Amino acid sequence: MSGFTRKKAGAAIAAFAAIALSLTACSGAATPSTSGSAAGGDTGKATGEISYWLWDNNQKPAYQQCADAFHAANPDATVKITQYAWDDYWSGVSNGFVAGTAPDVFTNHLSKYPEFVSQGQLVPLDDALAKDNMKTDIYQKGLADLWVGQDGKRYGLPKDFDTVAVFYNKKLLSDAGVKEADLQNLTWNPTDGGTYEKTIAHLTVDANGKRGDEPGFDKTKVKVYGLGLDGGSGGGNGQTQWSMYSGTTGWTFTDKNPWGTHYNYDKPEFQSTIAWMRSLIDKGYAPTIEAVTGQSSADIYGAGKYAMITNGSWMINQMFNYKGIQTGVAPTPVGAGGKRSSMYNGLADSVWAGSKNQASAIKWVEFLGSAACQDIVGKAGAVFPAIPSGTDLAQAAFQAKGVDVTNFLVHVKDGTTFLFPITDHASQVTNIMQPAVDAVMTGKAKADSLTAANEQVNQLFAG
């Protein structure tokens, strides 16, 4: 999942630098053994069955290898892995909390865990990690900090991270006379879209073969859109839809991150970004929200109907596996401030407070958070693990498949990432902002209507 927007401008840039990941720095911290405890601090082996849920089917084989290695070191323990699609996953977790059927351990998301903490559904890991000498400075810079709640307690160990880039259809570029190298230095602004919009327009083709920047282009009969939209408007976080643009303007979601208490959806930088997105639809360069809501932009791309889409690094394997489609990856465009931007989202594994096998569940989380497991995941070439050695192995694994992932990692190298907004009331914020942004993107409301929605959001934090 995955699962959003480059935080805070100006002052936020300092925060971004602090959060930026270092791909070359390796930690000398102790590596946990497969029993789940750090070398030299083993407090015993895990026992019993440990249920573990995740939502990405592409990662399941690698985690099964981790489970097998964990079982080999803990013969009396078995990890049962279950995978669900994103929506079913979270309804299953939430309903499981109530019914007492939630998994012992599950992959957690930054948008979910604050509410889970407030509900008392997660086990603080601090005491066990200290007892087992499990270090938290072994991860890419800043990742471990994301999973410390407002109470100062830790509720997850980092497993991976993701950024956003532009996937493009090489043949459609060639047909348009656009060189792949041209996509490496595109510029964007919310006024006229820069060279990025010019490229999107030229890559758009109607049923008569007219391009979006040619006289006679029929926006009512588009055969190929220059830019696809990922499943809808993006609501209030827009990770793969618009956050890579708003992040270049200096706009930030909240007053601080994590644990901000004031949202900034009333700012002109945000509203002008959403208005620009709507303008692409009006011009026929991008599909309507009604046409794509709930649809996979990747599959539509795979059918040859999108020349480009913006999406996350978790999609790399899928995007390069469409038959008959030659895919490339370009970086997100450079904003008026001279920098690119990408939301930075890091997942973690958490232990359910209702688990009947908490001690063993924590050991499984410790192993998931170790280089022993994350190197296995890295070698599988599916995502970027949180530990630098795993990240390096993933980059090499993708390269071996003929996929250059440099344009995803450039944000890490250049420090142009920003955090998914981590606040209380996340689900309520979504309930307010999803229809509000939908209304603008469908043309039913003007961008300044988002100011009223922002006031509703900030009322959640009043008092």
Image (cartoon, grey):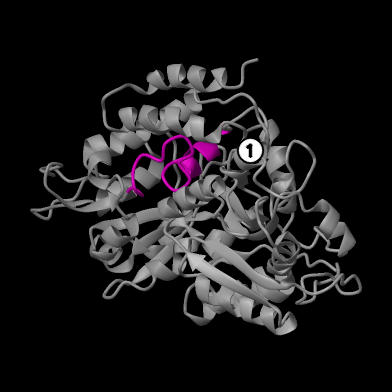
Where's residue 102, x and y in %? 56, 54
- The amino acid type, in three-letter code, at marker 1 is Gln
Residue 128 versus residue 446 in the image, above or below: below
Where's residue 368, x and y in %? 68, 67
Where's residue 127, x and y in %? 85, 54
Viewer-side residue, 2 vs 37: 37
Viewer-side residue, 450 vs 181: 450
Viewer-side residue, 457 vs 126: 126
Q: What residue is drawn where x is 40% and y is 60%?
A: 167
SS for dot 1: loop
Q: Is residue 228 visible?
A: yes
Number of numbered tags placed on the structure image = 1
Quadrant where the image shows the C terminus: top right
Q: What residue is drawn where x is 55% and y is 17%?
A: 459
Residue behind mark 1: 119
Where's residue 413, x and y in %? 65, 58
Residue stretch in magenta: 229-251
